Amino acid sequence: MTGSQTLLELAKKMPKTELHLHIEGTFEPEQMFAIAQRNHVALTYATVDELKRAYQFESLQDFLDLYYQGMSVLLHEQDFYDLTMAYLKRVHDDNVVHVEIFFDPQAHLERGVSFETQIKGIYGALKDAERDFGMTFKLIMSFLRHLEEKDAFDTLALAKPYLDWIDGVGLDSSEVGHPPEKFVNVFRECKSLGLKVTAHAGEEGPPAYVWQAIDEIGVDRIDHGNRALEDNNLIATIKQKALTLTVCPLSNLKLRVVDSLVEHPIRCMLRLGLNATVNSDDPAYFGGYMNDNYAALVEETQLTKEELYRLACNGFEGSWLDQPTKAKHLLELKTLFSQD
Ligand SMILES: Nc1ncnc2[nH]cnc12
Ligand SMILES: [Zn+2]
């Protein structure tokens, strides 16, 4: 067995987290066609292959156009349950033991699908996976940043009966032109309700957006954060605050945030002492789930065993799990890595 195969095996079998995952981005074409058929909804593409061929993106917006189109077949609680359960089964096989998943309520509300329908389906699957696989979870409601802050407030009002099921709020969709400062008031209210806060920042947007996420929104972590590396003061601040970055290697490649994985900044982030983690973002669209992301890093970036260990630890440390559960998983990782 070569060194790289050993590392690959270790990456596959180690217990891991997923902290940056859009449940609507796990919609595999085969499942999309099956649900479209049972709901009598027509898709723009005639076949699974035709749809898959369209998965060539020049930018985030290019992807988002297809992402919103794809999810339009989700109508009933069972659809949201099936989508979520398929993802949870898939990553259980990758030894993911804890997930923190986003859903985009506004993208379904605008199609007439109630908040209740969405969250009951998603939460039901999460609870079943907890019972059947022992998987732990957090649920994050994400606001669409291309809409107005008032829409986010309206969505928060709909979420209020379900706050026991929701652990945090996020900010996603088209980044450039929609800075975090646009949502300062709604995030302030979310915090006052005891919700955790995260935001996509620095995926395509400039370092100024990452500053705003930290200084004006007061995020608990940062989703992506790639472009933070352009600003040394920002790097120092992220480090000093020990903020976790939920980095998504295959997503960055597919959306042309990087030209190749060889030049992906994740190892640089670790060298700088930043708490980078590995995540899949929208795996059905970007060519890989958790183990595929780790495998791509092992194969293409000369990742070391120490770096692999650090990434896995960062996932648990940056999660919103309680301290004793974090400590339990960190000990498992320590034992596994010291044996191998
Ligand atoms: N990578 C991403 N960036 C911003 N919004 C998203 N929504 C789903 N995936 C996203
Ligand atoms: Zn994302």
Image (cartoon, rainbow, N blue to C red):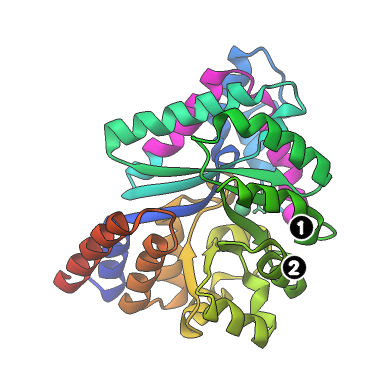
- How many marks on residues? 2
Residue at the location (61% across, 62% down)?
A: 219
Q: Which residue is mark 2?
A: 209
Q: Is residue 270 visible?
A: yes
What crowding class fits label 2: few (fewer than 14 Cα within 10 Å), some (14-19), or many (20 or more)? Answer: many
What span is colored magenta in the figure?
60-89
Q: Is mark 1 within 8 Å of ligand 1?
A: yes
Location of residue 310 by image quarter: bottom left
Q: Is residue 308 left or right of residue 139?
A: left
- Mark 2 vs 1: CB contact within 8 A: yes
Q: Which residue is mark 1?
A: 175
Task: Tell me, yes or no, whether the highlighted magenta stretch contains residue 300.
Answer: no
Q: Nearer the viewer, residue 1 or 205?
A: 205
Q: Secondary structure at mark 2?
A: helix
- Most extreme residue toward the left is 339
Foreground disc of the pair 2, 1: 2
Residue at the location (39% across, 40% down)?
A: 90
Residue 203 in the image, given as x and y percentages of width and height: 68, 64
Task: Tell me, yes or no, whether the highlighted magenta stretch contains residue 71.
Answer: yes
Location of residue 162 by image quarter: top right
